[in-house]
């Protein structure tokens, strides 16, 4: 079948292409319905990824956050019409030590293979998870991003020492919001402090125990562990400020991506015996864990709804451009394309 | 729930194609006959209960063979004999539905050229929706060229405002009962002139709703179109 692919051919330019997909007994076909734009997609769209990377990866369909409906499942595991979240990480092997999202052989939608901006997604059953009943489509669209925070916190949980009286989250954007929220949900006894730059954004962190502007953090404030959700060139400043406020033997979770090398205060990391924990992407187990959390603590969904930003119905390429351009100018929240 | 039939029209013998012996719908594109690409789009669409493929009598077995060879799973596919004209071919599909005892007020047919393999999920989806809501719909794109009318074929009689002009594509979709009634009310002379099913409905004063098509939903009619289709598929041109 001729599958329509809406691929980015160069910054700010999408074009239609077709790929013949064979409908076989092993693969499931999913019709995407709601796709959410990530900063990583924006970096390709705006051409800020660096010319060499762009030349290597484009043309490519963007988007790795999205949900859809099953249209064809030869094994009959999922009835036609089942709403599913699509897992963008595509492992090529399994390993008893390394998680699927860290295996160097794994492929990733919208990075090393076509993303979800397609007419149909051909995939396997293990890359799909049915959505919890009644789940808001617009929130479900950015499940992948939430699962990345969930994954990072799970890694923190198994790595960091057990004293968790207070933790700090640097970053008042979407990633900071999700990380702080999930921390509060998973560790209700722990004080969650959020550090950012914009008062209007910080005021939305109503679930946090305290919020501060980064220029006004009390000098005596101490935290047991910290999470960097800033990304970009500012992530170094955030990490160094975190190092200053961390108690010895604390853990630094680095969540934000930076295109540039980041200078950090390694002397104090050594002196305080800090652990630095990198986390990236997520795997099937994280999606499942997240859905379990939704079931146990449904109040989290109400907080997640606050992150829904622009909702753009997409019927053709001009609408895709509009969605990506709108996303650039957003202050906060996720831009969701309703894939018509 | 209404019955929704995909009706793939492959009745033509491709008189317009240059030196090619096979009807144009059987030409290969990327290792598969064009008609197979088209049927696959319909077979996979969850909104359709059955796909009827109307083929010339001499090519029915061939059509069945290639469907068996290339398509597994999806919606049920039935090959039927095409008629002497486009509308007669559509009526053959309607007669089949009637014979099966499935023709009622809610039965919808989504008729489509077998040589338009680039039709999308959205176009099919909206055809089903609007045929259900309004009784008939036609897939179109805004006219890109100025349309010039000449009744004498020698001088211009009109140049309609392009703003109001569209180019017709397919699918064209209908409530099957309404189309059947409209068609049967025509005289033989009218049947010979009215080759477009939507036009029959428009002349009856019915609301025929517009569905937004796609520029790439091309009809593979001329050898030139095969080259365009290959380019869309990213294939090397001959």
Image (spheres, rainbow, N blue to C red):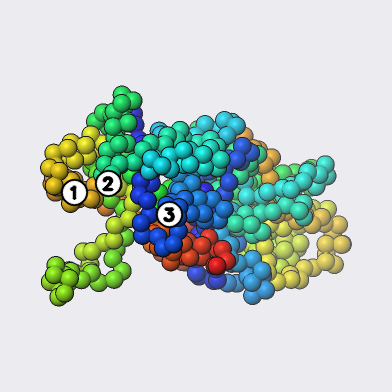
Q: Is residue A229 above or below residue B195?
A: below
Measure the alpha-carbon separation of dots 1 and 2.
Answer: 8 Å
- Residue at x 37% of width, y 51% of height: B13
Q: Is residue A279 visible?
A: yes
Of A128 and B31, which appears nearest the observer?
Answer: B31
Give coordinates of residue A297: x percent, y percent: 57, 35
Whether the residues at callouts 1 and 3 have beta carbons within 8 Å, the answer is no
Q: Is residue A307 visible?
A: no
Mark 3 lies on a secondary structure that is helix
Packing grade of label 2 (10 A; few <14, some 14-19, many >=20) is: some
Whether the residues at callouts 1 and 2 have beta carbons within 8 Å, the answer is yes
Q: Chain of mark 2?
A: B
Question: Where's the C terminus of chain B, which quadrant?
Answer: bottom right
Q: Is residue B33 above or below residue B215?
A: above
Give coordinates of residue B171: x percent, y percent: 34, 49
From the image, tell me which residue sits under label 2.
B85
- Residue at x 52% of width, y 56% of height: B29
The first of marks 3 and 2 along the sequence is 3
Q: Which mark is residue B24?
A: 3
From the image, tell me which residue sits under label 1.
B192
């Amino acid at each position: 079948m001729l599958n329509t692919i809406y691929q980015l051919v160069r910054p700010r330019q999408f074009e239609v292409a077709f790929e013949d997909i064979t409908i076989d007994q092993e693969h499931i076909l999913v019709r995407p319905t709601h796709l959410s734009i990530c900063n990583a997609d924006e970096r390709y769209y705006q051409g800020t990824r660096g010319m060499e990377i762009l030349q290597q990866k484009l043309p490519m369909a963007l988007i790795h956050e999205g949900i859809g409906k099953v249209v064809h499942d030869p094994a009959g595991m999922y009835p036609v019409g089942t709403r599913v979240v699509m897992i963008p990480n595509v492992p090529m092997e399994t390993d008893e030590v390394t998680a699927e999202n860290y295996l160097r052989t794994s492929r990733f939608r919208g990075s090393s293979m076509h993303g979800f901006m397609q007419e149909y997604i051909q995939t396997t059953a293990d890359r799909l998870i049915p959505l919890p009943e009644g789940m808001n489509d617009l929130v479900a669209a950015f499940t992948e991003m939430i699962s990345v925070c969930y994954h990072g916190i799970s890694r923190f949980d198994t790595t960091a020492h057990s004293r968790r009286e207070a933790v700090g989250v640097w970053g008042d954007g979407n990633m900071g919001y999700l990380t702080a929220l999930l921390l509060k949900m998973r560790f209700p006894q722990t004080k969650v402090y959020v550090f950012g730059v914009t008062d209007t954004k910080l005021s939305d962190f109503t679930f946090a125990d305290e919020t501060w502007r980064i220029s006004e953090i009390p000098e005596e404030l101490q935290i047991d562990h910290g999470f960097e959700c800033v990304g970009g060139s500012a992530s170094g400043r955030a990490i160094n400020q975190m190092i200053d406020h961390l108690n010895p033997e604390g853990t630094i979770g680095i969540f934000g991506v930076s295109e540039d090398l980041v200078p950090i205060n390694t002397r104090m990391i050594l002196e305080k015996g800090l652990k630095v924990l990198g986390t990236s992407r997520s795997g099937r187990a994280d999606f499942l864990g997240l859905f379990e959390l939704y079931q146990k603590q449904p109040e989290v969904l109400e907080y997640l709804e606050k992150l829904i930003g622009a909702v753009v119905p997409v019927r053709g390429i001009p609408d895709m451009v509009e969605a990506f351009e709108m996303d650039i100018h957003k202050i906060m929240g996720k831009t969701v394309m309703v894939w018509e | 729930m209404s019955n929704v039939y995909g009706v793939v029209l492959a009745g033509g013998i491709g008189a317009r194609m240059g030196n090619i012996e096979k009807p144009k719908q059987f030409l290969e594109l990327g290792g598969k006959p064009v008609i197979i690409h088209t049927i696959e789009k319909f077979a996979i669409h969850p909104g359709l209960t059955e796909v009827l493929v109307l083929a010339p009598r001499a090519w029915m077995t061939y059509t069945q063979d290639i469907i068996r060879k290339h398509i597994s799973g999806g919606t049920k596919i039935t090959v039927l004999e095409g008629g002497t004209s486009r509308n007669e071919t559509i009526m053959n599909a309607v007669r089949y539905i009637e014979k099966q005892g499935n023709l009622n007020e809610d039965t919808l047919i989504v008729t489509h050229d077998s040589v338009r393999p680039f039709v999308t999920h959205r176009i099919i989806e909206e055809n089903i929706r609007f045929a259900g809501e309004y009784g008939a719909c036609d897939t179109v794109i805004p006219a890109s060229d100025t349309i010039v009318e000449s009744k004498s074929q020698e001088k211009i009689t009109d140049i309609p405002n392009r703003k109001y002009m569209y180019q017709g594509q397919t699918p064209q979709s209908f409530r099957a009962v309404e189309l059947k009634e409209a068609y049967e009310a025509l005289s033989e002379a009218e049947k010979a002139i009215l080759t477009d099913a939507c036009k029959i409905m428009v002349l009856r004063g019915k609301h025929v709703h517009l569905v937004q098509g796609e520029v790439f939903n091309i009809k593979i009619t001329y050898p030139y179109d095969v080259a365009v289709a290959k380019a869309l598929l990213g294939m090397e041109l001959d």
